[in-house]
Amino acid sequence: MQQLIQIQRQFRYTVYVLLVTTILSLGAGLYTYITSLQMVKESRQKIYVLDNGQSLLLALRADISENRSAEAKNHVKRFHELFFTLEPDKDYIENNIREALYLADKSAMKQYRTYKENNLYNRVIASDISMTLSSDSVQVDFSSYPYTFQLHGKQKIVRKSNITIRQLSTSGHLRNISRTDNNTHGFLIEGWIINDNSDIETRKRSNF
């Protein structure tokens, strides 16, 4: 009888041990599962961006909406700086224009051809003219798509004898496209027009 009671106690002990082990195993498995789900969720909220092929930057997806607005303005500003910054160097002009045309549709190509037909680039080279652009403001309206933008700035034209300051006002639309090496912001300028490019002042160069 005593031996039977001892066997029953050992059996119950074994059952308790197995039950506790099972509960602990289930708890560990559930914890691992929940932790894995959380890690996957967090990883999906992260975007890894290669910076000039050298350093790896980490951006949170939650900040994309904010960054998108800044990217849009930078895209517009960059396009105009490339398109309107000219030096008396054929290769420099061609490189700038080529980079600018990656950022816009055929409306930019149309304006480029107009300048070319008017002999602008040849005159810049032949007369040693330097042209730079400073952007005063860039507004992008995200309330409707494609996004409408406006840029206001001043164009500085330096000739041998004088300096001319011109007002520059342009507008157009921005369309989302895939990011590429030539278009890192993922925007394309469409329907771009120059609204104002009139002279503000012309003054003689003091060192001429």
Image (cartoon, rainbow, N blue to C red):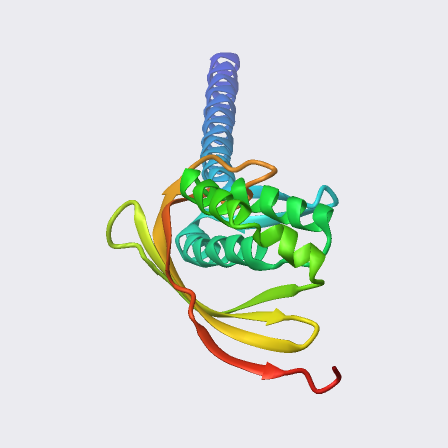
Picture coordinates of residue 189, whole percent (x, y): 41, 46
Question: In front here: 114 or 107?
Answer: 114
From the viewer's perspective, tell me whether residue 34 is left or right of residue 203: left
Picture coordinates of residue 7, whole percent (x, y): 51, 14
Above or below for 128 versus 144? below
**Residue sitting farthest toward the bottom:** 206
From the viewer's perspective, tell me whether residue 198 is left or right of residue 185: left
**Residue sitting farthest toward the left:** 144
Residue at horizontal 52%, vertical 45%? Answer: 117
Question: In front here: 181 or 9?
Answer: 181
Picture coordinates of residue 164, whole percent (x, y): 56, 75
Count every numbered label the image shows and give the total.
Answer: 0
Question: In front here: 15 or 175?
Answer: 175
Residue at horizontal 70%, vertical 87%? Answer: 206
Above or below for 119 versus 5? below
Above or below for 162 versus 21? below
Quadrant that contains the C terminus: bottom right
Residue at horizontal 39%, vertical 59%? Answer: 170
Above or below for 43 versus 139? above
Residue at horizontal 61%, vertical 64%? Answer: 131
From the viewer's perspective, tell me whether residue 51 is left or right of residue 108: right
Picture coordinates of residue 89, whole percent (x, y): 73, 53
The answer to which quarter of the image holds residue 143 is bottom left
